[in-house]
């Protein structure tokens, strides 16, 4: 009972609008979004309780803003049960890919089945309850590397260097969620750590969810970070909506405001790479 009480109900996403008829570049890919089904069993313990968010709502958002493809990411609230994600992927298999959460003992046959369904990575989550962490990485990394999959990391800034070391040791591509939650008040030099990771040519980071960085209302730190990263490593950045913006309890951003911000902060010359091309390389090569 206590574990359920500790998992507060998220706010729902805002109704779809697109007041200024924004359109993303051709073949844009939303590299990070979730779906939540009304009847799916939730993990316990968990960090939050999601609001229902079906794939049909994301497809409507994608059509409105010109998103051609998407990557479903397994949320922590479903633990190791990926059936909601896989069912959503089956609604549009040509344009959707997935990142799952699986135990180290997953069979080769299951890995091959998931690959055929469009799965392209495994998520390691150090920030939320009911995910898998670094303790599962050594066993899974060589097996998923063989399939051409990557390892996705939901981490804080203190773990950026560790991710760099682990991916180098196992010679596997890594993806860091949400700029590793770095922000203007993060101690140390996390942006420098992130730059060093990207410089190795093995790691991508998602420029999604600026509202998770503890930034100013004008997103001044986010803008500064993107200015640094897009100048040096535009080929290592992935755009994602983070729809339906789970684990928010006080306010939820408007999707068109977020997309307008992304279009503004990403230099025009890097639009094709960051909104489309990098995701094509990572998720749609096979």
Image (cartoon, rainbow, N blue to C red):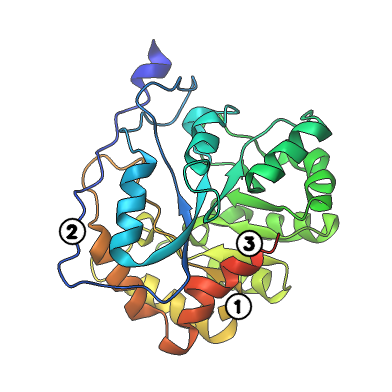
Coordinates of residue 241 in the picture (x, y in percent): 39, 58
Residue 61 in view, yes or no:
yes
Q: Quadrant of the N terminus?
A: top left
5 left or right of 77 in image: left
The numbered mark, 3 or 1, whose residue comes first in the sequence reads 1
Residue at 38% across / 18% down in the picture? 4
Give the position of the C terminus as an image quadrant: bottom right
Between 178 and 148, the one lying in front of the other is 148
Label 3 sits on residue: 284
Question: Mark 2 = which residue?
Answer: 17
In this orientation, which residue lies closer to the viewer: 161 or 129? Answer: 129
Label number found at residue 224: none
Q: Which residue is mark 1?
A: 235
Q: Residue at x 39, y 14 (%)?
A: 2
Q: Label 3: how many residues lie within 10 Å, few (<14), some (14-19) or many (20+)?
A: some
Q: CA distance from mark 1 to mark 2?
A: 30 Å
Where residue 34 sits, quadrant-wise, is top left
């Amino acid at each position: 009972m206590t574990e359920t009480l500790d998992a507060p109900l998220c706010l729902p996403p805002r109704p779809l609008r697109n007041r200024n008829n924004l359109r993303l570049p051709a073949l844009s890919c939303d590299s990070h979004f979730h779906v939540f089904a009304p009847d799916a069993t939730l993990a316990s313990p968990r960090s939050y309780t999601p609001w229902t968010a079906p794939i049909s709502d994301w497809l409507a958002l994608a059509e409105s803003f010109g998103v051609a493809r998407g990557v479903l990411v397994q949320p922590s609230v479903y633990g190791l049960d990926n059936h909601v994600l896989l069912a959503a992927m089956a609604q549009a298999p040509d344009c959707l890919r997935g990142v799952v959460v699986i135990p180290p003992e997953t069979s080769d046959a299951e890995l091959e089945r998931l690959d055929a369904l469009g799965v392209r990575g495994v998520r390691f989550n150090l920030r939320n309850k009911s995910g898998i962490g670094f303790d599962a990485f050594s066993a899974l990394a060589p097996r998923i590397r063989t399939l051409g999959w990557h390892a996705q990391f939901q981490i804080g800034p203190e773990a950026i260097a560790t991710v760099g070391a682990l991916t180098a040791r196992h010679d596997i591509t890594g993806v860091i969620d949400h700029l590793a939650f770095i922000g203007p008040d993060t101690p140390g030099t996390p942006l420098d750590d992130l730059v060093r990771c990207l410089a190795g040519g093995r790691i991508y980071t998602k420029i999604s969810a600026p509202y998770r960085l503890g930034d100013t209302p004008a997103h001044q730190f986010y803008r500064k970070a993107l200015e640094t990263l897009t100048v040096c490593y535009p080929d290592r950045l992935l755009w994602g909506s983070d729809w339906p913006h789970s684990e928010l309890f006080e306010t939820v951003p408007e999707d068109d405001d977020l997309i307008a911000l992304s279009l503004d902060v990403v230099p025009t010359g890097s639009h094709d790479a960051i909104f489309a091309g990098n995701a094509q390389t990572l998720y749609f090569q096979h």
